[in-house]
Image (cartoon, rainbow, N blue to C red):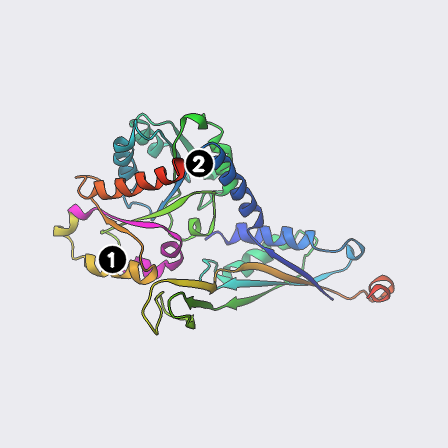
C-alpha cells in the first residue's frame, strides 16, 4: 500500500550510490532483497519503481527483487526451520520463544552500472 | 559493473525513529503506537483509556488520519492535549512516519507529558513496517472483523507487544468465534497478551489499563 514511498526511497538511495567517476554511465539494474514477512508487494513495487525512476539519473534501470524466506531459530531447542504458513512456534518442541533470522528484509544490496565502452577510468582502476 | 550498496530502504525513517526514541527517553515520555484496521473502535477505546489514566499519568495524543479532525475532537474531550496529523499533506500516506511524529511532538511541552499515545492511521499493513520511536506497539482488532485477520496480516501481529480484541459486547449478535480469533493471534505471536474488551461498556478495560500503566512505570521509574 506504501510501495510508492518505498520506490522513492529506493531511487534516492540508488542515485546516491553511483560513484562520482561513473556519473554519466547508465544504471542497468537495482538489486533488492525483500523478506516475505515484509508487507511489500513485489509487482506493485516494480510498477511504482518504473514511474519514479523514469525522471531520475537511473532512468531505464530494472528492479531485480530477491524474495527472502522467513526463517527462524527456536530459543528453547535451537531448531532452525523455514516458516511457510502463518504459524510462529517451533515445529519440533512447540515453543513460542523463537527468533526470526530472516524474512523482514527491505534492503538494497547493489546496483549494476553499464561498463563504460570508452573504458578509460573504470577498467584502468579496476 | 556491480556496485555494492547494502542499505536498508527505510534507513531515513529508522534514523529519524532512533532520534525520536532518544528525545522521548531524555524527556521521560513513554510512547505507545496504537494501530488497527479502520472502524475497530480505536478512538473510543483510547478515550476511555485516557479517562482512566489522567491525571495520574499525564497523557498526550497524536492522531493520524488521512483527513478530518473528527478523532482529535473526540479525544480532546478527555482533557488530554491532542494534535491531529492529516497525512493528505504528505500524499495521503497510509501510515505515520517517524519525521511526522517528530514534527507533531513539537506541539507538546514534553516535560509535562508521561505518556504519548500515537493513534496511527487505520490500516493493518503499512504502519507495521514503520518504526516511529515508540516504546510499545498495540494492535486493536474488533469482533466485527474476520477471525482470520491475524493470519492475513501476520507482520502487524508479530511486531505488536499486545493485542486488544474490542466490541465483545456485540458477541451475542454475531457468529464470531472468539476462541479462534485469539488462537490465530497467538499462533502468529506466541505469548502476546490479548485483552478482550468492550470500549463501549468498559468490560475488561481494567486489565488492559493495568498492563499499560505497568509499562509506563517500568520506563519512567525503573
Task: Identify residue for label 1.
Answer: B182
Q: Mark 2 lies on which chain?
A: B
Where is residue B181 shown, x and y percent of the image?
24, 58
Where is residue A46 shown, x and y percent of the image?
55, 61
Residue at the spot x=35%, y=37% of the render? B217
Tell me the crowding category of disc 2: few under 14, some 14 to 19, or many 20 or more residues within 10 angstroms, Cα based. many
Q: Is residue B72 left or right of residue B19?
A: left
Cα distance, mark 1 to mark 2? 33 Å
Q: Which residue lies furthest to the left in this view?
A: B172
Task: Identify residue for label 2.
Answer: B86
Q: In which quarter of the image is the N terminus of chain B?
A: bottom right
Residue at the spot x=46%, y=59% of the render? A38
Task: Describe the element under mark 1 as helix, strand or loop.
Answer: helix
- Please say if the residues under marks 1 and 2 sit with CB atoms less than 8 Å apart: no
> As rendered, which of B216 and B71 lies closer to the eye?
B216
Res B69 quadrant in image: top left
Residue at the spot x=43%, y=62% of the render? A99
Where is residue B191 shown, x and y percent of the image?
31, 57
Q: Which chain carries label 1?
A: B
Q: Which residue lies furthest to the bottom in this view?
A: A92
Is residue B155 inside the magenta stretch? yes
Q: Give the range drawn in magenta.
A: B147-169
Pair 1/2: label in front: 1
Asked if residue B149 shows in the view, the reply is yes
> As rendered, which of B109 and A108 lies closer to the eye?
B109
Is residue B30 inside the magenta stretch? no
> As rendered, which of A58 and B134 lies closer to the eye?
B134
Tell me the crowding category of disc 1: few under 14, some 14 to 19, or many 20 or more residues within 10 angstroms, Cα based. many
Looking at the image, residue A79 lies above or below residue B187: below
Amino acid at each position: 500500500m506504501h510501495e510508492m514511498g518505498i520506490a522513492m526511497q529506493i531511487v534516492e538511495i540508488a542515485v546516491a550510490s553511483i560513484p562520482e567517476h561513473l556519473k554519466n554511465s547508465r544504471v542497468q539494474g537495482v538489486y533488492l532483497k525483500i523478506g516475505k514477512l515484509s508487507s511489500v508487494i513485489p509487482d506493485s513495487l516494480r510498477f511504482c519503481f518504473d514511474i519514479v525512476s523514469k525522471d531520475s539519473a537511473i532512468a531505464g534501470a530494472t528492479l531485480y527483487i530477491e524474495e527472502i524466506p522467513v526463517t527462524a531459530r527456536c530459543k528453547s531447542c535451537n531448531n532452525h526451520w523455514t516458516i511457510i504458513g502463518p504459524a510462529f512456534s517451533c515445529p519440533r518442541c512447540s515453543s513460542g520463544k523463537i527468533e526470526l533470522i530472516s524474512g523482514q528484509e527491505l534492503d538494497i544490496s547493489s546496483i549494476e552500472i553499464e561498463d563504460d565502452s570508452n573504458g578509460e577510468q573504470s577498467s584502468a582502476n579496476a | 559493473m556491480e556496485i555494492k550498496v547494502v542499505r536498508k530502504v527505510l534507513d531515513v525513517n529508522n534514523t529519524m525513529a532512533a532520534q525520536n526514541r532518544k528525545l522521548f527517553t531524555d524527556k521521560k515520555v513513554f510512547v505507545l503506537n496504537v494501530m488497527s484496521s479502520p472502524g475497530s473502535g480505536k478512538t473510543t477505546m483510547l478515550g476511555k483509556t485516557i479517562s482512566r489514566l489522567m491525571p495520574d499519568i499525564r497523557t498526550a495524543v497524536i492522531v493520524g488520519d488521512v483527513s478530518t479532525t473528527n478523532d482529535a475532537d473526540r479525544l480532546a474531550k478527555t482533557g488530554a492535549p491532542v494534535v491531529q496529523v492529516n497525512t493528505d499533506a504528505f500524499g495521503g500516506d497510509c501510515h505515520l512516519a517517524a519525521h511526522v511524529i517528530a514534527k507533531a511532538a513539537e506541539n507538546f511541552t514534553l516535560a509535562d507529558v508521561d505518556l504519548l499515545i500515537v493513534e496511527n492511521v487505520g490500516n493493518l499493513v503499512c504502519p507495521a513496517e514503520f518504526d516511529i520511536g515508540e516504546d510499545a506497539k498495540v494492535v486493536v482488532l474488533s469482533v466485527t472483523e474476520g477471525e482470520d485477520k491475524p493470519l492475513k496480516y501476520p507482520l502487524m501481529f508479530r511486531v505488536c507487544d499486545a493485542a486488544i480484541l474490542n466490541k465483545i459486547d456485540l458477541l451475542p449478535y454475531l457468529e464470531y468465534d472468539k476462541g479462534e480469533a485469539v488462537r490465530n493471534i497467538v499462533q502468529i505471536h506466541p505469548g502476546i497478551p490479548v485483552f478482550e474488551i468492550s470500549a463501549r461498556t468498559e468490560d475488561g478495560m481494567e486489565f488492559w489499563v493495568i498492563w499499560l500503566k505497568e509499562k509506563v512505570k517500568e520506563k519512567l521509574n525503573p
